[in-house]
Amino acid sequence: MATSATGRFWLCAGRLMTPIIRRAASAALLAFLSIGFVGVACATKQAPVADVPDPARGARPGARASIETLVQQLSSSDSKARAAAAWELADKSQLTNEVKATLAAFANDGDREVRYAVYWALNAREEPAATTSYDTAPKPLRITRPEYPQDAFSKKVQGAVIIEILIGEDGEVAHAKIKKPVPGLNEAALACVSHWKFQPATRAGRSLPTIALVPIDFRIF
């Protein structure tokens, strides 16, 4: 039986907190799965800049388009143009219900990047605009530890970088955005999650994208 959920969950040190489940008017339920991840890293070498895909960035014009223009662009025959429009709409502070409905119409677009961009635009918010139902939640398969940047380690910079990630249909981290930065640690945190791999969420035997909030904790002991 499918479970209705926001598609958002917390992945934290040593545990996976699955999405808050919403079953009609029932109270929220929380479940935990052990995954053996430790978010505390030692200073070994400088972490590389993350290579987390954002296929629309390069396609965007220099000037940001209006919402009306982006909505029109969603109907383009060019999949890159559709994806670029959806990614940029995701960056808008507020979307009307009409715009959300237009985006939702492209949720099953034939191009994967368009589907990802639409899902992110509708769900990557403090209060998700749309819910996702699935039969099985995503499960972590490969969770790598972050590498402490040498400069930050030397300066004793500590803290937790909160990242919002999009787990793709193949379980890859298809997109990532920093929600709570820690200067000096952000790039290392992004580089860390870019290597993660999951078993994707599924519904009726089909893989679905999912959004997770990830705290990458840097502590010096």
Image (cartoon, rainbow, N blue to C red):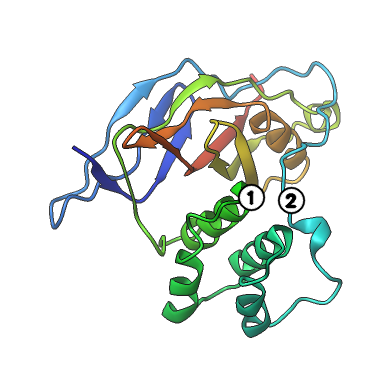
Compared with 182, 189 (above or below) is: above
Q: Secondary structure at mark 1?
A: helix
Quick one: label 1, few (<14), some, or many (20+) residues within 10 Å? many
Q: Is residue 55 visible?
A: yes
Residue that carries the numbered disc 2 in the rendered image: 55
Q: Nearer the viewer, residue 145 or 43?
A: 145
Q: Nearer the viewer, residue 69 or 23?
A: 69
Residue 18 left/right relative to 207 = left
Question: Which label is found at residue 66?
Answer: none
Q: Position of residue 194 (x, y in %)?
A: 68, 32
Residue 39 left/right relative to 4 = right
Compared with 187, 77 (above or below) is: below
Q: Secondary structure at mark 2?
A: loop
Q: Verify CB contact (< 8 Å) between mark 1 and mark 2.
A: yes
Quick one: label 2, few (<14), some, or many (20+) residues within 10 Å? some
**Nearest to N terminus: mark 1 or mark 2:** 2
Quadrant of the drawing holding the N terminus: top left
Residue 127 left/right relative to 183 = left
Residue that carries the numbered disc 1 in the rendered image: 113
Q: Position of residue 190 (x, y in %)?
A: 70, 37
